[in-house]
Image (tube, rainbow, N blue to C red):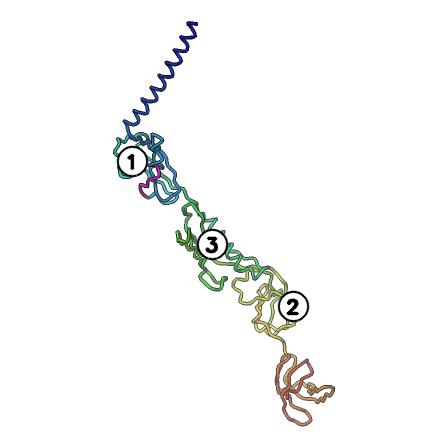
Amino acid sequence: MLYTCFSKYKINYLLILLLSISFLLLFANTLLGLTFDFKDLVEVRGEKLTVGDLANISPEHKAKEFKDKCLFHAPDPGQTRQYKAQTLMAYVQEAVHEAEKLQWTGADVVTVRQKGQLISKKRIYKIIDNYIQEQISQVPESQIKFEVQSMPEPFTLPHGQISYEIVPSSPNMIDSRQFSIIFRMHGDVVKNIRVRGQIHAFDKVAVARYQLRRDQVIEEDDIKMVSKDITSCTNPVLNKELVLGKEVKRGIYPGQVLEKRWLVRPNLVERGQTITMYISKGSLMISALGVACSDAKKDQVIKVKNIGSQKEVYCKVVSSNKALVEY
């Protein structure tokens, strides 16, 4: 019985002692005021540094009141700066406006780094390449490649949703030698860069298999379809059927890409050639022989001299030996 009473007395004594210690600690904190424990390394995402970013605040019930107070601008995204604790004390004292005594503990130097999102050269190239592919999608069989000549070094933008606008240097995409990329966050411009380069377009085109002479009529064995860089071509032939039977207006060397502007339809009629002139109206057709006064291609209107009357009339060439009288 005596032992039981003693145990209860001991437990009560310990409880009273713990409560007394807690009260004393709380009273001591009140006497000491606020304590700011500076951190060694701070990483932030916002533009401003707050008291809570730089230091742990005690007592805890006071932390909520002061931790969100702004001190000054954080370093630029991706950049790091160091601040002496003595300098930070002055900023905190001005922000807190607390009459209580402030205590300072922790690091003598605080390193602050603002987190950001790195825009690498690889990402810049991808942005340009995707834009070019989308804009030149009207040539689906072409393979478009962008050759970079110069671009800025990697840089860091603030955290957040980024949008960008791309402006080519020429309305004709293939001719563009420079692209501007304007980066925006929340509608505001945060970065503007320029990328220099050249677009290369590859497609299957008609090229000369052999040397082609001027005025030569192209036959199937004279050309072949191969994949070529057509960036510098004005209007290359992409369909083999469009070139067969045409004449070349200039000499073309083996392997050279054929341009549509170098091809013409051959003459169906030669000057001095005898052809049949005819007039057709319903089921009635009247014909006569004539002599072509000039060379002519299909559907071309030329003068034809009637052999019987020796009169010249205008006729449209419809084949190698016929011409329809124009009236």
Q: Is residue 79 above or below residue 85?
A: below
Circle 2 residue? 241
Relative height, residue 92 to residue 249 (above, below): above
Q: Residue furthest right?
A: 283
From this view, report whether residue 154 is shown above or below residue 237: above
Residue at mark 2 to residue at mark 3: CA–CA distance = 36 Å
Q: Which residue is mark 1?
A: 84
* Residue found at x 34% / y 41%: 49
Query: In the picture provided, is 164 more to the left or to the right than 227?
Result: left
Q: Earlier in the sequence, mark 1 or mark 3?
A: 1
Q: Quadrant of residue 169?
A: bottom left
Residue numbers of the magenta segment: 66-72
Q: Amino acid at mark 1?
A: Lys
**Spot occupied by residue 300 in the image (x, y as percentages of width and height):** 62, 81
Evaluate if marks 1 and 3 touch, with contact meaning CB atoms under 8 Å apart. Answer: no
Which residue is disc 3 drawn over? 148
Q: Where residue 261 sits: x, y (%)?
A: 56, 71
Q: Identify which amino acid the numbered label 3 is placed on.
A: Val
Give the residue furthest to the top.
2
- Residue 35, how many percent across, how many down? 31, 30
